[in-house]
């Protein structure tokens, strides 16, 4: 059931890239929350993997807080 709901991450690192790549391959919805300052090419990389990218906040902490909120609200699995 969790597989249908999806996972959410809020870090711009190799871990998030790997989560996006493998989750899409396993047909698990994946949401990546990034600060608004994240470069468009970097956001495109996540989208190219199939992740749903949300730009939120002016800091990484803002993005993480928003990801926690979305995870709780929508029953996504938050990965750190």
Image (cartoon, helix red, strand yellow):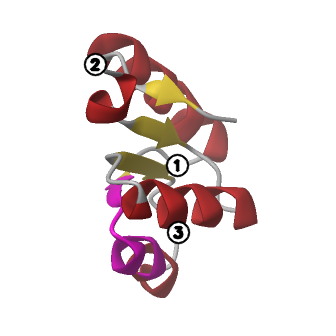
Which class describes the residues within 10 Å of circle 1: few (<14), some (14-19), or many (20+)?
Answer: few
Q: Mark 1 or mark 2: name the one nearer the start of the chain.
A: 1
Q: Position of residue 35 (x, y in %)?
A: 51, 54
Q: Mark 3 or mark 1: name the one nearer the start of the chain.
A: 3
Residue contact between numbered discs 2 and 3, judged by CB atoms under 8 Å: no
Quarter of image, res 53? bottom left
Taking the spot 46% from the left edge, 38% from the top edge, the residue there is 8
Residue of label 3: 38
Residue of label 2: 74
Asked which secondary structure carries label 1, the reply is loop
How far apart, in angstroms, are the residues tagged by discs 2 and 3? 24 Å
How far apart, in angstroms, are the residues tagged by discs 1 and 2? 23 Å
Give the residues in magenta. 45-54
Asked which secondary structure carries label 2, the reply is helix
Quarter of the rendering occupied by the N terminus: top left
Which class describes the residues within 10 Å of circle 3: few (<14), some (14-19), or many (20+)?
Answer: some
Q: Is residue 15 above or below residue 47?
A: above
Q: Mark 2 or mark 3: name the one nearer the start of the chain.
A: 3
């Amino acid at each position: 059931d969790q597989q249908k709901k999806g996972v959410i991450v809020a870090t711009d690192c190799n871990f998030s890239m790997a989560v996006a790549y493998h989750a899409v391959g396993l047909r698990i919805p994946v949401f990546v929350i990034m600060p608004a300052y994240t470069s468009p090419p970097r956001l495109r990389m996540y989208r190219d993997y199939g992740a749903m990218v949300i730009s939120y906040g002016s800091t990484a902490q803002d993005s993480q807080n928003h990801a926690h909120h979305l995870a709780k609200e929508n029953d996504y699995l938050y990965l750190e």
